[in-house]
Image (cartoon, grey):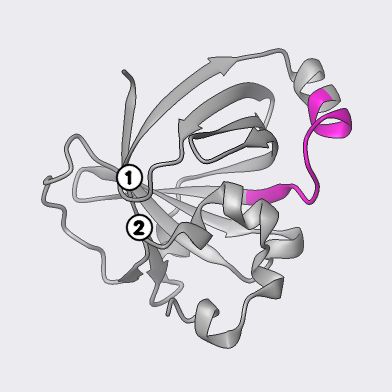
Amino acid sequence: MPQEIERKYLLSSNAWKALSHQSIRMHQGYLCNNSQSSVRIRIENQAANINIKSMTVGISRAEYEYSIPVEEAKELLDTLCKKPQVQKTRYLVSHSGKLWEIDEFKGDNKGLIVAEIELESEDEVIELPEWVGKEVSHHERYYNMRLAEYPYSQWSDNEKLGK
């Protein structure tokens, strides 16, 4: 079973911006979600995919991803995906041999910036960059699927601080 092992962090500074070597515009929506899985459509620049993830809370989840035509992805986003949808720019930053993905959200989630790193194993030791702050891997509200249901613009001040 394909597995995604990923940790999520809030940022302590904007120092990562000067280190970014690529950006990717993303627009994604959810066809459905339930207690076991979510089904997402995502357009990344000029590519699109459908993604199925288990609803396990934590750093490891089952994940299946398949390419689909961009025009079909646009149709699915326009006609079948729930609203609101998630829009963000993903910045890629290399640090100590690892690739960090920093998502700067737009629209209803504007103001939220989250750093993610994919790991080879759950117990992999990583060197955290100076600009990484509090870990939020176990806070479900930071999952993109939850951001579509309960956008950052609706969070309380305590939620925005990662509490």
Does the magenta run of residues contain 90? no
Q: Which residues are magenta?
A: 76-88
- Give the labeled residue for mark 2: 137
Q: Which residue ends up furthest to the bottom in the rendered image?
A: 157
- Give the labeled residue for mark 1: 6
Image x and y of residue 42, in percent? 65, 32
Residue at image location 42% in from the left, 27% down from the top: 63
Of mark 1 and mark 2, the one earlier in the sequence is 1
Question: The disc labelled 1 sits on which kind of residue?
Answer: Glu
**Which image quarter is the N terminus in?**
top left
Q: Nearer the viewer, residue 95 or 161?
A: 161
Q: Is residue 16 above or below residue 13?
A: above
Q: Which residue ends up furthest to the front in the rendered image?
A: 35
Question: The disc labelled 2 sits on which kind of residue?
Answer: Ser
Tell me: 95 left or right of 89: left
Q: Nearer the viewer, residue 76 or 118?
A: 76
Residue at image location 51% in from the left, 52% down from the top: 143
Q: Are marks 1 and 2 in contact (CB under 8 Å)?
A: yes
**10 Å crowding of disc 2: few (<14), some (14-19), many (20+):** some
